[in-house]
Amino acid sequence: MGDIMLLVYIQNYSFLTKVIQYLKQADIQYTTDFDMNFSSILLAEMNSKSLKIMDEYPDKRIIFMTHLEEGKIVHCFQSNQKRSRLYRNRYHSFFSKCYKLIVSLPYFKTLFKKDCDQIDVIPYEIPIINISRNTRDIYQKYHLNKRKKRIIVIDLYYDYVEFMYDVAVRYPKFEFIYMGYQPKYLLTRKQSMVLQKLPPSIVYIPYFNENIFSDICKIGCIVIDFTSYLLNRSYLYISLSFKSQLLLLDTPLYQDFLIPSKHCYFFKTKDELLLRLGKIIDDRAMNLTDVGYDLIRNYTFYEIVQKYRDSLQ
């Protein structure tokens, strides 16, 4: 892009400061002052203010980072409801006005390739995590059984509680750490009935963050991940960083990023999950942990800085 001055307009404070940190480290000229002389504008939210800026500065090159919008994008592109279709059209229209898109995964590059000629991928950085100093602290803190091997299950809203029941009943020698929560008044009658009969080998962790999840991964051996993509990429990175055998609900989000049966195992149905899990437990499946770790181990701060430099200079 040559030597440019980049105006950065991002309303989300946390994301703004992170982007500024990368730009400073990459020695990219930027400003947040509209009175400065700038040639490009970096945006990260699709809202009325962004549209107004685009209309007020038609001669400026608009660069849009999708990272803050990607959760909403995934939802509306996987739903066929009228509201979702409306949002899809808005995204296509909005991105067609951009000079460049910066996305976090190849999936989004594929999704909007017809809307914008220039699309770069800048992944999320591996999170800096704090874990308990020793495993004894983890066992005590979360009331876990030291004598059992643990399988971690991420199911944010108990949407897959029937899967949880079948898996826990089939493998009673394992301790299952069930991460997620849904209050009683939002549960269906069927969910409530299944939850009431789940075996005692299941330990509930209703609240979790990256540090708690890292603690659990430190002493777990298998992660069954239904819904962490609804949070952020950090939970996937943590699973791979701790070299857990990862079973991931198949979603278009990770296409062209994670290769099935190379970086992790995907499943679509309960039968597929039970089949793949059984092979892992019986040592009849290839251990993919080293290859999965190698995929993301370079997503460090300085690697991301270089990607900013490559994309924005």
Image (cartoon, grey):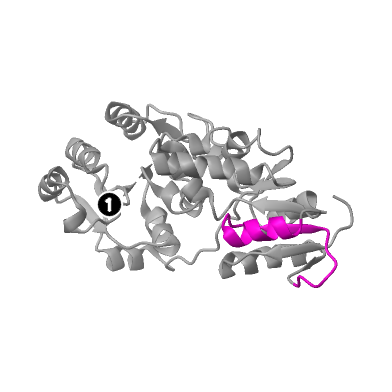
Element under label 1? strand
Q: Going by the image, does 273 lie left or right of 59?
A: left
Residue 235 visible to an observer of this rendering: yes
- The quarter in which the C terminus is drawn is bottom right
Left or right: where 260 falls relative to 279: right
User: Where is residue 17 shown, x and y percent of the image?
Assistant: 64, 69
Work out whether residue 249 or residue 151 is closer to the camera in this orientation and state it: 249
Q: Could you classify mark 1 by the number of other residues whose Cα lies within 10 Å: few (under 14), some (14-19), or many (20 or more)?
A: many
User: Residue most toward the right?
Assistant: 3
Q: How many badges with numbers are in the image?
A: 1
Q: Could you tell me if residue 288 is visible in this image?
A: no
Residue 300 picture location, percent across and down:
65, 55
Residue at left offset 32%, top offset 34%: 281
At horizontal 64% and vertical 44% (from top left) the residue drawn is: 95
- Residue at position x 44%, y 64% from top? 211
**In the image, is residue 286 above or below residue 85?**
above
**Residue 148 position in % (x across, y down):** 26, 50
Specify whether residue 38 is painted magenta.
yes
Residue 163 lies in quadrant: top left
Against 53, is 235 above or below? above
Residue nearer the viewer, 77 or 221? 77
Give the residues in magenta: 33-57
Residue denoted by label 1: 178
Q: Amino acid at mark 1?
A: Tyr
Q: Nearer the viewer, residue 162 or 146?
A: 162
Q: Position of residue 156 (x, y in %)?
A: 32, 51
Q: Quadrant of residue 47?
A: bottom right
Q: Does residue 51 show up magenta in the picture?
A: yes
